[in-house]
Amino acid sequence: MNYLMWDVDGTLLLTGGAGKDALINVIKDYYFLDAFDFTQSLAGRTDSDIIKKVVTRLRGRCNTAEAAGILIRYHSELPKQLPLHRGRVLKNVERTLAYFRRPDSKYLNCLLTGNTRTGAQEKLAYYNLDKYFCFDHSVFGEVSENRQELARIAFSRLYLANNQSLSPKQLIFIGDTPNDVLCAQAIDARCLIVLDGSSYQRQDFDSCRPWRVIDCLPDDPAQLEAMLNEE
């Protein structure tokens, strides 16, 4: 079995800023702020890293209880924000996920995302994509602040639970940011970059050297499977 480790935002779907606005609302409410915005891009980062840096910026330090309190509120706010924003599933995503979910597939759809498990589930369920994924073999952003550590955890879990002859090459990371590439490279796995929903341009990946960069998922998912089979 091979494992497709999908990113969520910018790779599978765009929420139109629902996640960002949900977190901004929570931070403003939590700290009694009239206004707040992020000073760094959120693309490719884990929710736990985002929250830690925000709290440290505002308070000078961040403890676990405070970060957990913000996450709890975020998980309540996100479902309210999703219907208020014009998001969309990216081109050919659903047909690709359905193709790799067929009974005879040698690939399993999993997630490796900076979103928390709850956040990922909320987004995917809203866009009716959650049914395509194996959550048991997925790894989420609350597990570690470090995106590269998520890759190591994903490989270790699969190795111990299912297949002790597992090779990192059997995990294919599919994302839209340089952080996705670095994540895959942490275990010497392949990373496929899909530019369709990305905020980055093709040249932005020259220095990190992903396995492949494509403009969007192909109309025929069998073409993607053939590419993946090339090694």
Image (cartoon, rainbow, N blue to C red):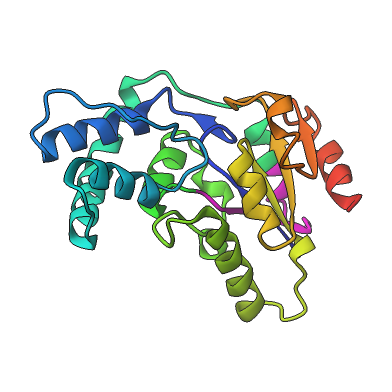
Seen in the picture, residue 162 relative to 78 is either above or below; the reply is below
- Count of marks overlaid on the render: 0
Left or right: where 32 falls relative to 3: left
- Residue 150 image offset from top left, x and y in percent: 53, 60
Q: Quadrant of residue 167?
A: bottom right
* Residue toward you, 94 or 27: 27
Give the residue displayed 51% in from the left and 49% down from the top.
113
The answer to if 107 sits in the magenta stretch is yes
- Residue 23 image offset from top left, x and y in percent: 28, 36
* Residue toward you, 37 or 126: 37
Left or right: where 166 falls relative to 48: right
* Residue toward you, 138 or 184: 184
Q: Quadrant of residue 90?
A: top right
Seen in the picture, residue 134 relative to 214 is either above or below; the reply is below
Left or right: where 50 falls relative to 175: left
Q: Residue furthest left?
A: 32
> Magenta part of the protein: which range?
98-113
Seen in the picture, residue 77 relative to 150 is either above or below; the reply is above
- Residue 121 image offset from top left, x and y in percent: 42, 47
- Residue 185 image offset from top left, x and y in percent: 70, 55
Q: Residue furthest right?
A: 230
* Residue toward you, 175 or 206: 206
User: Residue 149: in sight, yes or no?
Assistant: yes
Give the residue displayed 53% in from the left and 48% down from the top.
131
**The N terminus - image quarter:** bottom right
Give the residue displayed 23% in from the left and 37% down from the top.
77
Seen in the picture, residue 184 relative to 193 is either above or below; the reply is below
Q: Quadrant of residue 161?
A: bottom right
Give the residue displayed 67% in from the left and 42% down from the top.
98
